[in-house]
Image: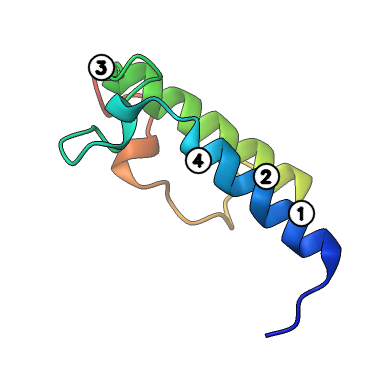
Amino acid sequence: MDIDADTVAALRVHRATRGSLMHELVRDAALVLGNLGGTHRHPERFSRRFAGQVAQARTALGGETPGDPAAPPAPPCCSPTACR
């Protein structure tokens, strides 16, 4: 397969970055949504931050904004009250 030099360079950087990850973060029992220390994230803060990032992405893409009657309801994990 022929790929351009920029793609090869990007793949090499990706491989080096992946290789530099802490081994604790890539072990079989590592948390999928853990923090950089390898411990659990607080569920309410995680949900609140995720919901905020979804709202920012929707706004940036010109989509619905939270509270827009045309917007579909947020999944429970995105609800500000989901973890209370």
Q: Quadrant of residue 8?
A: bottom right
Q: Amino acid at mark 3?
A: Thr
Q: Quadrant of residue 57?
A: top right
What residue does disc 2 label? 13
Q: Is residue 26 left or right of residue 65?
A: left
Q: Residue at x 76, y 76 (%)?
A: 3
Q: Amino acid at mark 2?
A: Val
Residue 10 in the image: above or below residue 82: below
Q: Quadrant of the N terminus?
A: bottom right
Residue 31 in the image: above or below residue 11: above
SS under mark 4: helix
User: Which is nearer the N-term, disc 2 or disc 3?
Assistant: 2
What residue does disc 3 label? 39
Q: How far apart in space, not on screen, are marks 3 and 4 (Cα)?
A: 20 Å
Which x, y percent locates residue 71? 56, 54
Q: Residue at x 49, y 25 (%)?
A: 49
Badge 1: residue crowd in 10 Å (few <14, some 14–19, many ≥20): few
Q: Quadrant of residue 35?
A: top left
Residue 35 in the image: above or below residue 3: above
SS under mark 1: helix
Which x, y percent locates residue 4? 83, 71
CB-based contact (under 8 Å), mark 2 and mark 1: yes
What residue does disc 4 label? 18
Viewer-closest of 70 and 37: 37
CB-based contact (under 8 Å), mark 2 and mark 3: no
What residue does disc 1 label? 9
SS under mark 3: loop
Q: How far apart in space, not on screen, are marks 2 and 3 (Cα)?
A: 27 Å
Q: Is residue 51 left or right of residue 47?
A: right
Q: Mark 2 or mark 3, which is nearer to you?
A: 2
